[in-house]
Image (cartoon, rainbow, N blue to C red):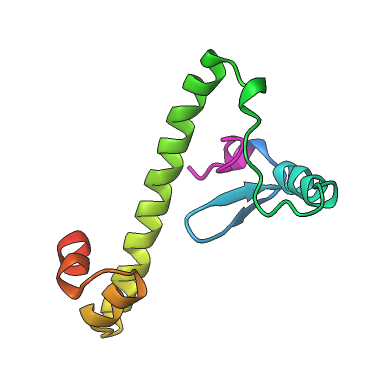
Amino acid sequence: MNRCSFCKRSADDVGTLVAGAGVYICDDCVVLCAEAVKNKPAGLKRATPVWEGVDDAALIAHLPRIEAIRHLVDDDLRSWVGEARRRGISWDRVGEALGMRRQSAWERFA
């Protein structure tokens, strides 16, 4: 079952779930993201957590969510590499695209 990579709600629990490269985002999170972009402070390039506002329990509770997303991204990357190889794209080109040697790409994805 696909889930929003941000709020972790399932596709059945949201209005729309949009797929990206290894991630999904629901319509509610799109609205939140649009607000964050619209209201971002001048000069801010990347949003970072305000650590003072995150207690230890919330920080620990968030770790499994990040790990789950990492697995989704890894699975998606594996699918993309598989398609590249199915199309006959060389391990050299795959490795170069991923910033690694051919041998490393082969060991990771073959």
Q: Which residue is drawn at 84% across and 51% down?
A: 38
Relative vertical location of residue 17 with respect to residue 57 in this rendering, above or below: below
Q: Which residue is drawn at 52% across and 15% down?
A: 56
Relative vertical location of residue 22 with respect to residue 39 in this rendering, above or below: below
Span of residues in magenta: 1-12
Residue 103 picture location, percent across and down: 14, 70
Relative vertical location of residue 95 with respect to residue 89 in this rendering, above or below: above
46 sits left or right of 109 in the view:
right
Residue sitting farthest toward the front: 43
Q: Is residue 10 magenta?
A: yes
Secondary structure that dominates the magenta span: loop
13 sits left or right of 31 in the view:
left
Q: Residue at x 27, y 73 (%)?
A: 95
Closer-to-camera residue (37/16): 37
Quarter of the image where one finds residue 63? top left
Residue 1 picture location, percent across and down: 48, 42
> Tag count in the figure?
0
Q: Is residue 16 magenta?
A: no
Residue 20 picture location, percent across and down: 56, 59
